[in-house]
């Protein structure tokens, strides 16, 4: 993991990559959630006020979507648009299925994500439990 300025600190790997900002992380999450809402609306039909019908479908779709994105890559659609990536804090590579699932499950609960506001490196409980870190990604080529 690296610091805000890419310096080598006790918690870094010394790779020199900058951490993703909280605003970029929030916007990426919002984009992904809206994409899941739109996909659910297009496949299930109109969204009803039923609190357990479509809402559960959207939550499960989000969990599956994020888990697959972090298992087979380092970015979701929202992360690509915001030019950030989620990687293993230890290796800088993809998370793998189990850690991606843990991160996605905790992120979908939202409360663990709010803990990123008080962590010095903006790592929420979902990042700490999965051993992940959010970094700025280079421009697409």
Image (cartoon, helix red, strand yellow):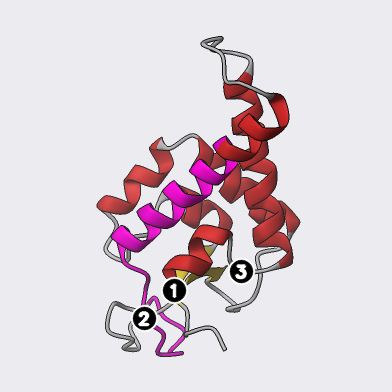
Q: Is residue 125 magenta?
A: no
How many labels, in total? 3
**Residue under the point 67% across and 48% down:** 65
- The label shown at residue 74 is 3
State the residue position of label 1.
135
Quadrant in which residue 38 is drawn: top right
Q: Nearer the viewer, residue 6 or 14?
A: 6
In magenta, the rendered stretch is: 11-37
- Measured as percent of width and height from the top left, residue 9 is found at 33, 83
Residue 18 badge: 2
CA gap between label 3 and label 2 equals: 15 Å
Decide: few, some or many residues near mark 2? Use Cα within 10 Å; few <14, some 14-19, many ≥20.
Answer: some
How crowded pointer 1 is (Cα within 10 Å; few <14, some 14-19, many 20+) is rated as: many
Quadrant where the image shows the C terminus = bottom right
Residue 63 located left or right of residue 89? right
Q: Secondary structure at mark 1?
A: strand
Measured in 3D between alpha carbons, the distance from the residue under mark 2 to the one under mark 1, in whole angstroms, is 6 Å
Q: CA distance from mark 1 to mark 3?
A: 10 Å
Check disc 3: other Cα within 10 Å, few if <14, some if 14-19, many if 20+: many
């Amino acid at each position: 993991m690296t610091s805000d300025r890419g310096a080598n600190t006790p918690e870094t790997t010394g790779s020199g990559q900058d951490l993703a900002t909280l605003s970029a992380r929030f916007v990426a999450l919002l984009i992904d959630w809206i994409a899941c809402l739109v996909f659910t609306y297009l496949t299930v039909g109109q969204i009803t006020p039923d609190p357990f019908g479509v809402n559960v479908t959207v939550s499960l779709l989000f969990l599956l979507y994020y888990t697959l994105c972090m298992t087979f890559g380092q970015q979701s659609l929202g992360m690509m648009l915001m030019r950030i990536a989620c990687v293993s804090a230890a290796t800088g590579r993809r998370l793998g299925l189990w850690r991606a699932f843990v991160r996605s499950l905790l992120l979908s609960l939202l409360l663990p994500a709010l803990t990123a506001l008080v962590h010095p490196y903006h790592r929420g409980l979902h990042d700490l439990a999965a051993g992940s870190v959010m970094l700025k990604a280079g421009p697409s080529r």
